[in-house]
Image (spheres, rainbow, N blue to C red):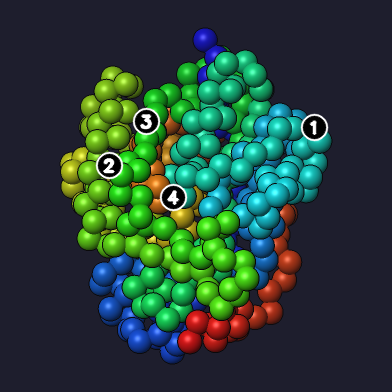
Amino acid sequence: MQYAKIIGWGKCTPPATLSNEDISTVVDTTDEWISTRTGIKSRRVSHVGTGELATVAAKRALDCAGIAGEDIDLVLLATCTPSTLVANTASYVQQQIGATGAAACDVNAACSGFLYALQNATAQIRAGMVKRAVVIAAERMLWHVNWAKRDSAVLFGDGAGAVVLEASSEEFGLLATKTGCDSEDREILHIRNFGTDIDKHDSAQPSDILFQGKDIFKRAVKGMSEACDDVLSQANLALEDIDMLIPHQANLRIIQAIAKQLQLNDDKVMVNIQHYGNTSAATIPIALCEALEQGKIKPHSHIMSAAFGAGLTWAASYIKWGERVTPIIESKAELPECKQTGLEIMADAIKYCQ
């Protein structure tokens, strides 16, 4: 039996920040209003495109694994905010990391994208189609925020995370998964004025993240909890077997509700939404990297992840970690220097929406 072991991991969080206090200078809100409703205190703002964020995360994951880009057979990039639609942004990453000849594809399942892509890459490795893959999730969500709308303007951030998978006879990696989509009410969460549905001759309309918070909350908790139950059943595990839950970081209240539903103590739940906001598909790999950095993931840890996103997509996964929890090579991959504050980067976008 062949498995897809995770041998490398890396994240890329842009240096510029946008605190709740910063946002309160351009939007009618306060730090208290934002933090009590979402758990978010700050978020990162990217001065570069999604492809560049993804490239740095991928290079750091490759260094962590101790391998070169030329050793990769497949590049999957989970994103709903690509730098370019045609050519796909994964092909840019493939070029930048030197993965010459590797298959390259973007995956759009919104916030569930990383788990969808991880399932796809794992299946290809287990089927013997590829030997090594890099799975990346990268988002530049703040590019699509309508700064005239308080409810959505405060939620999002930019960032990227990645893992490297390798064919192995050892029973590690993604061992059980469940993905799905509840499309009946897909309109309760979407980006308006984006894609070919827009009137390309009407340039006055900014993109706009629309959502119905209460409905999303109910569906997110229900969908992720049920998916986790399904995965536990597949893996023949009980809740007490789980060492760490790494959920999608959309809202602290949703995370707490899922943890309660799954009867998990706080010390078994990875939370970093306070630092980054909702980075869509990138939240889980960023949180995975930080759980490793903080020593929360040990050799052979049982890890559960769950996500819910526009579509309405949902996913859950069970990962059995391998032996290594530290990088083979400390990566020197970095973004270009940023000399602007978060507010300065977003100044034109904010002005456009007001």
Tell me: 223 left or right of 204: left
Most extreme residue toward the top, as rendered?
1
- For residue 100, which quarter of the picture? top right
Residue matched to label 2: 223
Q: Amino acid at mark 3?
A: Lys
Q: Amino acid at mark 1?
A: Gly
What residue is at 35 percent from the left and 50 percent from the top? 186
Query: Mark 2 or mark 1, which has the lower sequence index?
Result: 1
Q: Disc 1 marks which residue?
A: 101
The kind of residue on which mark 2 rests is Gly
Q: Position of residue 340 (x, y in %)?
A: 65, 80
66 with respect to 311 (left or right): right
Residue designated by label 3: 178
Q: Does dot 3 land on a helix, a strand or a loop? A: strand
Mark pair 1, 4: CA separation: 28 Å
Q: Residues within 10 Å of mark 1 (few under 14, many from 20)?
A: few
Badge number at residue 111: 4
3D distance between C-alphas at marks 2 and 4: 13 Å
